[in-house]
Image: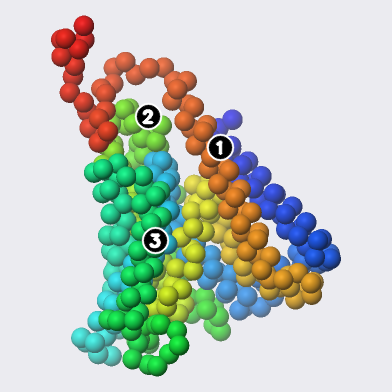
Amino acid sequence: MSGRWRGWMLAGGVVVAVLAVATTLILLAGADPLTGLQGLVAGVSSSPYRVGELLVGAVPIAIVALTLIPALRAGVFSVGAEGQVILGAIVATAATLGTANMFGEAVPGPVYWVIGMVSGALGGAAFALLPAWLAERWHVNIILSTLLLNYIAAGFLGWTLRTWLASGENTATPQSEQLPEASALPDLIPGTRAHIGVLLIVVIAVLFEWWRRTSHATRIGVFAERPRLALRLGTTRARTLYGTMLVSGAGAGVVGWLQVAGVNERLFNSVSGGVGFSGLAVALLGALLPGGILLAALFFSALTAGALGIQSATGTVPSSIADVIKGVLLLGVAAVAGVTARSGAARPAAAPPLTDVAAVTPDGEPAPPPTGEERS
């Protein structure tokens, strides 16, 4: 069975398991599962506003997941998208407000959008470079470093909203000044929070669908399983770490800008909203395929957007059932990741030895050839 079909079967198994758990929870709450399902569907499609909420929830998750594809294909398991979203949002907000302060109201909207998107991408990418450098320089576990950096980013955001980006208004919730009206992304569906940034996921999905058919994507995949062979193909450890982390960091930073310019129109402590961890789960659930990721992101968003519909339809099932189902989904995705990693690790062991390939140092560079004494 090919790896693609295995990934789809595992992802399908996770979805079936999640639906089984949701059905069981609804039954335990004394409600009819069919009624709950109808409420879920109504919760995401009963009005244009509900459809807009579905799209608004899916966009940041999908972008994070799509830009994680190269890193996960290379075996670089980063959990730092939360912090990268935060840094991207901070830099994008600062750049937008700074532009408004310098040039006043004469700046057109598209200029604000370009400045915000580029600034957010640079902020997220710069923050992603730190764990990549730690992993390359001192071989620090990238899962641990990215996880801990999320807390640093959250602390920096809290300090930012109390100091240099704090709103001049007397508010109970720490927040920045409201962004200029021209910098807000226009609505895609009138009367909803769905903005034109939704179209960005289509562009990104097409780009990654093209990328995964290139030779570079093939070399990235080879690096995850046979780094010595990947080195012969021109893919070093340093280049892979920095390149994949920059892509995922830039994507997370763009999400930070979208959350500020498209949804809230100002910076809040809750800007990340858990989309970093959700994006990682969606990337794995979608089998690292752009089409699968888009479907998984919509499914994940529907759980949140439709939870209120379930509560309204049944009268006994609380909307917090979405959080329980997401927890089960994350557990299932973790199991899929474990199975995939174990099967991936088994393949190189079964392959014939690479007798003609140079050894590789821990930094991913060719080791010097053995001396005559070492050969003997």
* Disc 3 versus disc 2: nearer the observer: 3
Instruction: Name the residue beneath numbered marker 3.
Output: 150
Q: Which circle's residue, 2 or 1, is located before the other in the chain?
A: 2
The percent position of residue 278, horizontal first and vertical second, equals: 52, 59
SS for dot 1: helix
Task: Please report the residue visible at 33 percent of the width from the left and 75 percent of the height from the top.
Answer: 159
The percent position of residue 355, horizontal first and vertical second, equals: 32, 15
| Residue 171 sits above or below residue 154 on the image | below
Q: Which circle's residue, 1 or 3, is located before the other in the chain?
A: 3
Where's the C terminus, which quadrant? top left
The percent position of residue 185, horizontal first and vertical second, equals: 42, 78
Pointer 3 local density, CA inside 10 Å: few below 14, some 14–19, many at least 20 = many
In the picture as drawn, the residue positioned furthest to the bottom comes out as 170
Which residue type carries mark 2? Arg
Q: Which circle's residue, 3 or 2, is located before the other in the chain?
A: 3
**How many angstroms separate mark 2 from mark 1 (CA)?**
18 Å
Task: Please report the residue visible at 52 percent of the width from the left and 31 percent of the height from the top.
Answer: 343
Relative placement, left or right, of 255 versus 336 is left
**How many angstroms separate mark 3 from mark 2 (CA)?**
31 Å
Q: Which mark is residue 6?
A: none
Instruction: Name the residue beneath numbered marker 1.
Output: 339
Q: Please name whichever residue, 53 or 277, is drawn nearer the observer in this view of the structure.
A: 277
Instruction: Name the residue beneath numbered marker 2.
Output: 226
CB atoms at circles 1 and 3 under 8 Å apart? no
Which residue type carries mark 1? Val
SS for dot 3: helix
| Residue 181 sits above or below residue 114 on the image | below
Image quadrant where residue 371 sits: top left
